[in-house]
C-alpha cells in the first residue's frame, strides 16, 4: 500500500545494485551479434551475475519465470524467454537485466540493433529511448506521476507510435516490483506526488503500430497484436531533493 521512502543506507545499496545491473548490459553488449541464441546470452549473463558479481539474477524463478534475463526480439514487447532462437542481422532485441545485491534490486534494459538494422528499427529504438529520457528528466519532488506519463505518451503519439498500457514502471527496492505503478501514459496533475527518497523504474514500451498486445501460450512473452516492431529502454531512478539520480548508469555514463 505505502510507498517506501529509502533511507541513506538503503539508497547506497540501491546504487550498488543499479551499477551491477548496468555492468551486465555493458558486459553482454559485444556478444549481441548475428548467430548467438538468446539462451546463450542468458547463460553468459547468469554466470557473470552469480560468479563475478556474487549477486542474484532476480527474474530466475520470479513467479515461475524460467531464465535469468528477459530477451524480447522484434515484435516481442517484453518478458521474452531466452531459448534456441538465433539472432540474425536486422533483428532488434531488448535485454532486460535485474540483479539483487545485498537485498536490493537494480533493474535496467536497453535495445540492441543486430547487424544491419532497418530505418524503422532504428526509428522505434530512438523514439522509445527519447520517451524514457523525457520521463526521467521530469523527475523531481512535487511532480505528479501523471505529468510524467503524459509527457511520455505525447512524445510517442506525436511520432505516430503507441504506448503499451498493460505494463508499466514500478517502485523498486527490497522488492522487485513495489508501489507506485509508473504508467507511461496519463493526464497532468493526476497520480501521486513525488518525494525525495522514492526509487522506481521508467520503462516505456513503444510500438510502431497499435498499442494492443497479446500474451503467447508460454504465459510470459508479450507481443504486439498487429506484429509491429516494439522497443523499450529502462532505468532505475532515485528522486533526490533537487531532481533525480539514475541508479543504473555506469560511472561517467550520461543519459
Ligand atoms: N525486468 C522486468 C521489469 O522491468 C520484469 C521481468 S519479470 C520476469 O519489470 F519474470 F519476466 F523476469
Ligand atoms: Co522494471
Ligand atoms: Co526490467
Image (spheres, rainbow, N blue to C red):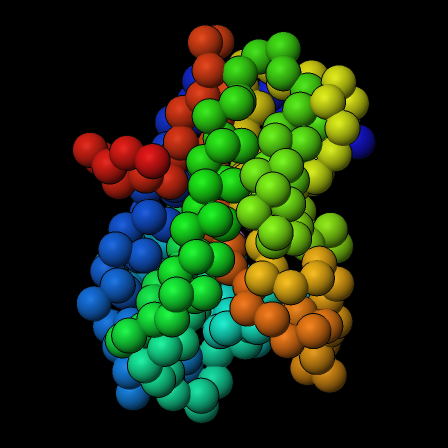
Looking at the picture, tell me which residue is in the foreground, 250 or 63.
Answer: 250
Q: Is residue 76 visible?
A: no
Give the number of marks. 0
Q: Quadrant of residue 75?
A: bottom right
Q: Quadrant of residue 224?
A: bottom right
Of the 4 image quadrants, the one containing the C terminus is top left
The location of residue 228, given as percent across then percent down, is: 60, 71
Instruction: Report the side of 214 relative to 122 (left or right).
Output: right
Taking the spot 26% from the left edge, 63% from the top edge, the residue there is: 29
Taking the spot 41% from the left edge, 81% from the top edge, the residue there is: 39
Taking the spot 71% from the left edge, 58% from the top edge, the residue there is: 211
Q: Given the current orientation, which residue lies at the most extreme bottom position?
A: 84
The location of residue 97, given as percent across then percent down, is: 43, 57
Judge whether 147 appears above or below 220 on screen. above
Instruction: Report the side of 192 relative to 115 (left or right).
Output: right
The location of residue 214, given as percent across then percent down, is: 74, 71
Instruction: Report the side of 33 relative to 62 (left or right).
Output: left
Taking the spot 66% from the left edge, 50% from the top edge, the residue there is: 163
Looking at the picture, tell me which residue is in the foreground, 5 or 191.
Answer: 191
Looking at the picture, tell me which residue is in the foreground, 214 or 157.
Answer: 157
The location of residue 182, given as percent across then percent down, is: 66, 37
Q: Is residue 85 visible?
A: yes
Judge whether 214 appears above or below 198 on screen. below
Judge whether 190 appears above or below 78 on screen. above
Looking at the picture, tell me which residue is in the foreground, 143 or 10.
Answer: 143
Of the 4 image quadrants, the one containing the N terminus is top right
Amino acid at each position: 500500500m505505502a510507498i517506501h521512502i529509502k533511507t541513506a543506507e538503503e539508497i547506497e545499496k540501491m546504487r550498488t545494485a543499479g551499477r551491477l545491473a548496468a555492468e551486465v548490459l555493458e558486459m553482454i553488449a559485444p556478444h549481441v551479434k548475428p548467430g548467438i541464441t538468446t539462451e546463450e546470452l542468458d547463460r553468459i549473463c547468469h554466470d557473470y551475475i552469480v560468479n563475478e558479481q556474487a549477486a542474484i539474477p532476480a527474474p530466475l524463478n520470479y513467479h515461475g519465470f524460467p531464465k535469468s534475463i528477459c530477451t524480447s526480439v522484434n515484435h516481442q514487447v517484453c518478458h521474452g524467454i531466452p531459448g534456441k532462437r538465433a539472432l540474425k542481422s536486422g533483428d532488434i532485441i531488448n535485454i532486460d537485466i535485474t540483479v539483487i545485491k545485498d537485498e536490493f534490486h537494480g533493474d535496467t534494459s536497453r535495445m540492441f540493433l543486430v547487424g544491419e538494422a532497418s530505418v524503422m528499427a532504428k526509428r522505434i529504438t530512438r523514439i522509445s529511448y527519447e520517451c524514457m529520457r523525457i520521463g526521467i528528466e521530469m523527475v523531481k519532488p512535487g511532480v505528479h506521476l501523471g505529468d510524467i506519463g503524459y509527457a511520455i505518451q505525447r512524445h510517442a503519439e506525436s511520432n505516430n507510435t503507441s504506448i503499451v498500457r498493460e505494463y508499466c514502471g514500478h517502485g523498486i527496492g527490497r522488492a522487485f516490483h513495489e508501489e507506485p505503478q509508473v504508467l507511461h501514459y496519463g493526464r497532468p496533475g493526476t497520480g501521486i506526488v513525488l518525494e525525495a527518497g522514492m526509487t522506481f523504474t521508467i520503462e516505456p514500451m513503444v510500438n510502431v503500430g497499435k498499442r494492443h498486445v497479446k500474451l503467447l501460450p508460454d504465459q510470459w512473452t508479450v507481443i504486439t497484436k498487429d506484429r509491429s516492431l516494439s522497443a523499450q529502454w529502462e532505468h532505475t531512478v532515485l528522486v533526490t531533493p533537487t531532481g533525480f539520480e539514475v541508479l543504473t548508469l555506469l560511472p561517467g555514463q550520461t543519459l
